[in-house]
Amino acid sequence: MYTGGFNLNKVSVQELVDECDLVVYSGGVNLDSRYIMTSDISRPGLEMTGYFDYYPAERIQLLGMTEISYSHKMKKNERARIMDKMCGKNTPCFLVSRFLPVPVELEEAGKRHNIPILRSKLSTTRLSSRLTDFLQAKLSERRSVHGVLMDIYGLGVLITGDSGVGKSETALELIKRGHRLIADDRVEIYQQDERTLVGEAPEILNHLLEIRGVGIIDVMNLFGAGSVRQNTNISVIVNLENWSADKQYDRLGSGEQEYELFGVSLPKINIPVKVGRNMAIIIESAAMNFRAKSMGYDATQKFEDNLNRLIKKNSVNK
């Protein structure tokens, strides 16, 4: 299923401005050629006091109420010296939250070192969270998986299986039943946190679905904006495999399997494909059953409890 890993490595400051609704205060030239290489954000509080031993100059330098207020209490010469020293060779940009006033010394230092200064109306905490989420999504290592990713009742279901088993055709039927397509053929997956994997389509395949004998169809154009979604957290993997008379298949749902990616384990359900089986309805039911299990209701356990009660009852009646 896994077909390779890659990393986008960098995000331009212009992308950051566009995606996070930032305002360019100064130094707005060549923002598309200035790059951010890490998702970590720096709040240079200690640096404002003159401590630069571990200054992470390669990060976005985010100044909030604390940093700006402290700078106002500094002497002008000291403020100019600190601001100039904060302009590292690899510093991508300075960012000031809450539309706070930018110190003149910072503006002058930014111009001397060709480092842009950006502003945002958001509070420092909200802005930091938004930047981190955006940069992690862009800079995280990604792995390309062969399959189809669907949003079924709010669950991210990754449909895998050998080529020609019917993944895309099943996805089309699911779309007609009101579910949403995220990606067909290739799914790009990255790790959002220790327990969450996110999947999305490569840009070239966005909203597109390949049906053998028909060709490429634009799902958004044919079925509307409600039939697609940009990305989703992956909750479960449904693996389609051609039915074989020699193989034993799980009939009670007690044989749980897992698939590990980026150190995160995902539950995996194997479903045999056979003529006459409506795979869309089966996958839809599997998603609903998985959700029921995650909410504490297990039909397999209920069956086993019923069976045990029946055995106990029959034993008493003997």
Image: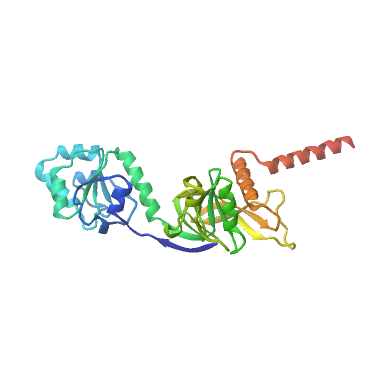
Q: How is the image coloured?
A: rainbow
User: Residue at the spot x=48%, y=50% of the render?
Assistant: 220
Residue at the (63%, 44%) spot, across then down = 289
Residue at 65% x, 49% y is 282
- Residue 270 % position (x, y): 64, 55
Looking at the rendered image, the quarter that the C terminus falls into is: top right
Q: Residue 154's x, y, as percent?
A: 53, 43
Q: In which quarter of the image is residue 72?
A: top left
Q: In this view, does 310 lie to the left or right of 32?
A: right
Q: Quadrant of residue 139?
A: bottom left
On screen, residue 197 above or below 186: above
Work out whether residue 195 can be spotted: no
Q: Count every numbered label the image shows and give the total.
A: 0
> Looking at the image, can residue 278 be seen?
yes
- The percent position of residue 303, horizontal first and vertical second, equals 73, 41
- Name the spot of residue 209 as percent of width and height, x first: 52, 57
Quadrant of the image containing the N terminus:
bottom right
Q: Which residue lies furthest to the left in this view?
A: 77
Residue nearest the viewer, comparing 308 with 149: 149
Q: Is residue 147 above or below residue 303?
A: below
